[in-house]
Image (cartoon, rainbow, N blue to C red):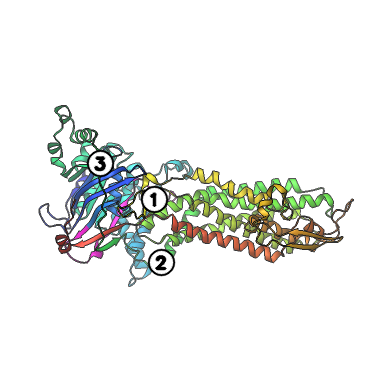
Amino acid sequence: MEALNEALLEPTNGARDDDGAAPLRLEWAGVGVVAGRKRRIILSEAGGVAKAGRTLALLGPSGAGKTTLLRCLAGRAEPDAGSVRLVVSGGSTRAARAVFVEQEDVFCPELTAREHLRFRAGLALWRRDRTRAANAKAADSRAAELLETFGLETVADHPRVGAPADARALGGARGLSGGERKRLAVALEVVGSPKVVFADEPTSGLDSQLAASVVRTLAKLAKGGAIVVFSIHQPSQRCFDLCDDLVVLAHGKTLYKGAAANAVGQLAPPPEIAALPPAEAILEVAARDVPTAAPPLVKAPRRFATARAPAPSAPFYARALALAHRGVVTQLRRWPLIVAQFATCAVFASLIGMLYEGDGRPRIDQKGVENVNGYLFMLCTGTLFSSLFPPLQLFFRGLAMARREAASGAYGLPLSVLAMQLADVVLQQALPCVFVSVTYRLIDPRHGLEQRLGAFLLVAQAVAFAGASLGYLIACLSPDSECRRPASSSFDDGSRRWREDPSLTARFSHAVATVVAPLFVFPMILLGGLYANVGAIPVGARWINKVCLRARDFEVPSARSTIRHRRDPLAAQVNPINYGFQAVSQSQWRDYGDIDGFPPVFATGKDVLAFFSLAQRSFEANLYRLLAVGLCLRAAVFVAVALTAGRRGLLEVVTEAQATENPLVS
């Protein structure tokens, strides 16, 4: 370990001496952020400079504004006042590539560290003039290099990355430790050799030894010629010694900026505090009360070019293939979950079979009509539930990682969402086939069994498609802390714009999404066509009829009379259960002959359709509308993803000459 630490700290040819001119520097002045109607100060008149080849640590107690300042510097949030810019001493401004290492690690628990790095390297290092094999070899080489640099060779292929809550679900594998996960998070972001690296609390939750290893990793990047800026809450002495420069924050104000070795001397703590280790002494000084009167905020205009997160170098088809491959591998390694889903589906189908099996009569009688309709309705509702809830968990987790990687420029977020949906489609469509195959013999087998079996399979798969689409949409509407919200503050001219502020952003968990999902499903069940006749809504729900798409009556001829009904209310017009139930009912009853029993409530299958208001549309029309609902929900998923996508890095980039002509003024 000591040899590795020395290797990490060994200067490389890309670094400049402290006194030499650095190729890049990040400078900011007058940065201010306020929040809430009471204009609570988050940052006030923050300023400083970060140089290439040196590590800059943002130090301060909780609530000092470290994360807010870091996100403003990285371009992930826009300050209310002040300016942040990246100065390029020479060459093209496009060479300035910045990455951001989030505080919370997000990985695919089913993949290994090597597979994570190979995937990101394959996208970052792809070249059009190389063959597919050559690009794959380059990605493998870069992954191996990063594994060695960050000390992850021993855990490269085993165990899988895992997650704290998923350790046992991975067959007993413990997964990577906290320090290994942090180093892997940094390695994933620096695959493309960025020039600017930001890290938010990279040592949180780690012991002193693991925290020191992560800071040594960041120091290695700085010695390679990059700008490294990270926030740290309570560093150990070993971590503090690895920091070249320091910015001390307290209550949003900058107490000190400069070399870390000179911080204690300039802050001049009392004798009883000065005896403490330097990091503790600085935090004790920063914990004192600081006035927080909000000064007027003046937003500096943006006059120069901007540098976003690096655009993916791989073309569309290469990114699509890489995402599809990762999605398939991830699905296959979830085999315990897949087995559990199929087993649950088979058991549920068997229970339905025992309930609706009947007494073995060759024909359906009057009482059997109710059982058959109950089975048809259960087919639609069970399929919807089984396809709705898996995306709430799996897609919710995958979407968080996709947002993180898309913000880093690995690929576009819509492409990732499409790839995740395609990876799930086989399992989503296979489960309804199992359910129908087990239960279809419940229906009277004397009339067109094979034809109805195909129709039932089509409807079940269409309902599963719509249910999964609804699950994706609910997951997308549960944003995390990286989503944008309207700014609560305004400029002097009263203008408002979107600004990302984690303190103002509502965080919805997977548990909340699971609780909210039934609110969407229960109205669909009530208006599905079995529990409430959609052609005769009761008085208490007359308001639903007022939003009918078509407010005219229609007539359905039966064996004895003509029955008048109202058009479906709007809630039924977008109800996949209603469309599915009408479709399978049409397939079952439209050509069904005489129904036995006395009194003869239903003489033929058409009487059943007329009585339950299930004859409004043909089987084909219901199937088409069911598919249309699924497609509209999928389109809404992409719209929701676009609306809740986090802000990508946006930095103002200037040349040295432009910086000299337009100096920053605090």
Q: Which label sits in the foreground, 1 or 3?
A: 1
Q: Nearer the viewer, mark 2 or mark 1?
A: 1
- Label 2 sits on a secondary structure element that is helix
What residue lies at 57% left-to-right and 51% top-to-bottom? Answer: 388
Q: Which residue is mark 3?
A: 212
Position of residue 618 relative to residue 336, above or below, is below
Total marks placed: 3
Q: Nearer the viewer, residue 152 or 39?
A: 39
**Image location (x, y in percent) of residue 452:** 73, 61
Cα distance in 3D space between marks 1 and 3:
28 Å
Helix, strand or loop for disc 3: helix
Q: Is residue 85 visible?
A: yes
Along the viewing direction, whichever of 305 and 348 lies nearer the viewer: 305
Magenta range is: 86-112
Of the residues shown, which amino acid type is indicated by label 3? Ala
Q: Amino acid at mark 2?
A: Ala
Q: Residue at the spot x=37%, y=48% of the render? A: 488
In the rendered image, which residue does mark 2 sit on?
318
Instruction: Report if residue 109 lies within the magenta region.
Output: yes
